[in-house]
Each structure stands twice: as structure tokens, then as C-alpha cells.
Image (cartoon, rainbow, N blue to C red):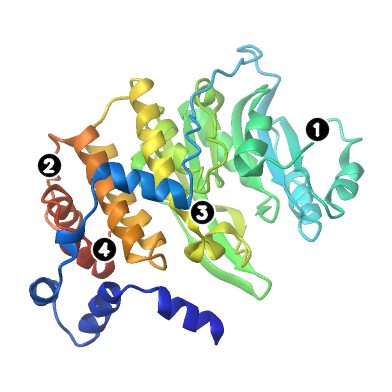
Amino acid sequence: MNKYLFKLTHISLLQFSVVLLQKFSFNIKQIRTLLETLSTQNRRLPSYEYAIQYLNKLNPDPQNSAIKKHILQNNDYTYDLKIIVTAYNAEDTIEECVDSILNQKTRYSLIVEIIDDGSTDSTKQILNNYTNRHNVIVTSQKNQGFSGARNTGLKTINASYLCFVDSDDILKDCFAETLLDKAFAKKADIVAGGYQEFNNSGVISEFYYQDKNQFDPYELSGYPWGKIYNSALFTEVTFPVDYWFEDTMLIYLVYDQSHIVCTVKDIVYRYRRNPRGITAISATKLKVIDSLWVTRQLLSDRQKLNLGFNEGIYKVTLQQMCTNFIRFRFLSGQVKRATFVIQRQIINDYFENFRFKENGYLKNIEKAIKSNNYLAFTVYVYTGKF
């Protein structure tokens, strides 16, 4: 009961009004018109400088770039696929995870590096049971979070392709064979497969791609897992450290560096829903502001890497503006107004001359941002879909 009371007290009056009016079958135009006559939100927007200062006081921007040079061993890679597993206090799931990797039915050569990221439970002891395997490397380090652990695995790239596996997830035994078959046949940079979401009670949902030899990279899921990547994609980039939502890096710096992206219709990955994961616990934590900071940092990195700005990354960024705002839904109205101001500046800095071509939700989001209309933006975010 206390949990729900806490959430209610942290929902802004504006957000509550939008949801309530929608329940009574008001359409978006009616909601916006009504609230505009009652609200002074737009007149109370802070300056950009104040917004940056205010959010930094609540949760400082780590300002850690994702740009980093990695030294590839050579072009004659020893293995076909390197599997990077990050583990932190994973004693309940790590054995099932690693066994699913070692039980792959494949003719391809695999190397597995498991990074024990400063576990304080029996994870390290469990991993010691695998150190005698010729294709398994167990690396222990002080806790550095998801980014630091994955980056450790990226220090040595000795395979043609890479993939990332979370320690509570499971690979289907066809994972390597199915994805590598497609990768080598089509000389693909990325190959993605379907996945199941499950918990201790069973399968929650399933997601399928169609079998395609040319897929829009911006339409890939943002998760790092369930895919294999050409190792060359990580020559200049790494996961930015000290942020939550660090895997946003893939969308901004990796996906559209690829020339050939393929998908397969098979389910190859099983994702365990973790009630203690960042996605589940982040909504009421100030650390969730990292979602905004990492967006800002990655756009800067993209510019420094001369990756360019196109319609695809503009669409992604508009979507990200909405995602950030939704993630902040239980933070104060002051936080959300500061976020809107910063996101408007981001759009002006990188996409001033862009215009979204399709009518609909994102077109409305664009109009609200470019016209500096916080109220309209809020209404569209909370009532729309993309």
C-alpha cells in the first residue's frame, strides 16, 4: 500500500489531469485546450543554464564519452564468436546461463569470457568450476557496473563476431549456429533473432523478427543481447561508464555504422525479467536522470565520430525524448520541466533544420518541442504511442 501512495504523491498534477481526462474520453486536442486555459506551466520554464545546473545537483552528469580505441589482435580471428557474459551476485542463475552457452549445438568456434564484476555472493566460486575449459576465460574485477564489465570483455577482441549475454539469461542451443550461419552467408554486420521473456512462473511473452537479409538498424530492439555484432563495429566505441541505460550507445553509435543488418525468425535468446533490475527499480530514483545525460553525451560522441545526422537518427532521438520523459514520470514537475528545456536545446543543437515527415505522434512531439510548448509535449507523451 505504501508503494502505491508513494507513486501517487510523485505523479504531477498535470500528469494526473491528462490521465483522468483521457479516462473520460476526452481526445488529445480537447485535453490540451482545456489544460491550456488552466495551466501556467509554459510560463514557468527555467532557462537552459538553470535546468542543467538543477539536474546536475540532483544527479551529476558523469560526462563519460563512449569513444575509445580498441586494439584488435588481427584480422585472422582465432574464433568465430566471442560471448561476453557479465555477472554480479548471480549465484542463482549463472550456472544455468553458462551451461546454455557451453551446450550450443554448433560447428563454429566459440570463446566465452565471463566477467565477475565484484560479486559478494558465491558467483566467483561457481565460476571457478569453469576455469578448466579451454574456451572459457573467467575475469574477476572490482565492481564497475554493466559498462565496466562489458568493456573488460571488449579489451581483447579475438573473434569475428561478438555478443553480450546477461548472467540471468539463457541461450537457446541454436543461438550461435543460427546467427552465425546468417552472418557469414550474408557478410552481415549485425544479426538479430527473436527472444522469449520469462520468469520463474514461465514464459511471459515472445518477440519475433521476420527473416530478412536487409533490415533497418533503427528498428532493432535497443537491448544489447539477442544479437551478434561484427567485431569491427567496436573498434572506436565502448559502453559509457557510470550511466544507467548505457546500452543506448548501441542505437547512437553502433547500429548505423553497419552496412548489412539481418534478422532471423527463430527465437534464440531467453530474457529473464528481473524484479530487481534497473528497469524495474529506476522510476523513483534520481539516478534515472542518467537517461537524459547519456542521450546528450552520445549525440556529442556521434558528432565527434563524424557519423552524421539523418532522418533515422532524428526519429530515434524524438522517440528517446519521450522515453526519457516517461522514465521520469514519478519525479517532480520541476525535474520534468528542466528535462523538457534541455531536450529542446538538444533538438535545436543537432536537428534544427530537420522536420519529421510523417503525421502522427512523433510529428506532434516535434511541434511541441520546436514551439517550446511544455504542456503540449506532456499531453502527447502521456497519451500517445510510437
Residue where numbered disc 1 is placed: 137
Mark 4 / mark 1, whichever is N-terminal: 1
Residue 181, percent across and down?
56, 35
Gap between marks 3 and 2 measured at Cα: 32 Å
- Of labels 4 and 1, the one closer to you: 4
Is there CB contact under 8 Å for labels 3 and 1?
no
Tag shown at residue 381: 4
Q: Which quarter of the picture shows residue 164? A: top right
Residue 299, percent across and down?
35, 33
Residue where numbered disc 3 is placed: 287
Q: Amino acid at mark 2?
A: Arg
Is there CB contact under 8 Å for labels 3 and 4?
no
Gap between marks 1 and 2 measured at Cα: 49 Å
Marks counted in the figure total: 4
Q: Point out the image quarter for the C terminus.
A: bottom left
Q: Secondary structure at mark 1?
A: strand
Q: Amino acid at mark 4?
A: Val
Mark 1 / mark 2, whichever is N-terminal: 1
Q: Amino acid at mark 1?
A: Ile
Residue 361, percent across and down?
19, 59
Residue where numbered disc 2 is placed: 355
Is there CB contact under 8 Å for labels 4 and 2?
no
